[in-house]
Image (tube, rainbow, N blue to C red):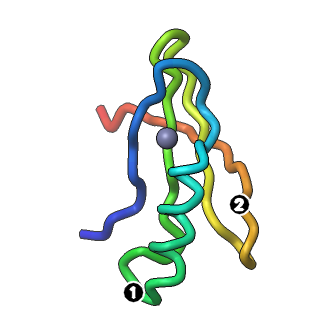
Amino acid sequence: MKLVSIFHSHPSGNHPSGVDITNMSRLQESGLKSFQFIIWTIMDSETKDLNGFMILEDEIVQIEVIIKNSK
Ligand SMILES: [Zn+2]
């Protein structure tokens, strides 16, 4: 098994907060393999919309999140 994403929600909005950016950078800079290329999935609690972000080449980039039902 591999950790692929860290999920959390915001009361409003689904983009990384200042705290999120700090934590994303800390995990990336930790050098621990388990935390490289982690997708930060953030949900807007009002609209239930999801966004995904990760750090690539020292920049935060938005990625498309597709959730599939395994059934
Ligand atoms: Zn957040």
Quarter of the image with the C terminus in it:
top left
Q: Does residue 26 lie above or below 4 as drawn?
A: below
Amino acid on which the number 2 mark rests in the picture: Ile
Amino acid on which the number 1 mark rests in the picture: Leu
Q: Residue at x 41, y 55 (%)?
A: 5
* Left-right relation of 35 to 22: left
- The residue labelled by disc 2 is 60
- The residue labelled by disc 1 is 32
Q: Residue at x 59, y 31 (%)?
A: 14
Is the C-beta of the residue carrying label 1 under 8 Å from the nearest atom of ligand 1? no
Give residue 64's quadrant in the image: top right
Please state the horizontal and vertical placement of residue 35, each as a whole percent of the image.
Answer: 42, 74
Please state the horizontal and vertical placement of residue 68, each as a whole percent of the image.
Answer: 44, 35
Q: Which of marks 1 and 2 precedes in the sequence?
A: 1
Q: Secondary structure at mark 1?
A: loop
- Structural crowding at the residue carrying mark 1, measured as other residues with C-alpha within 10 Å and reported as few (<14), some (14–19) or many (≥20): few
Q: Secondary structure at mark 2?
A: strand
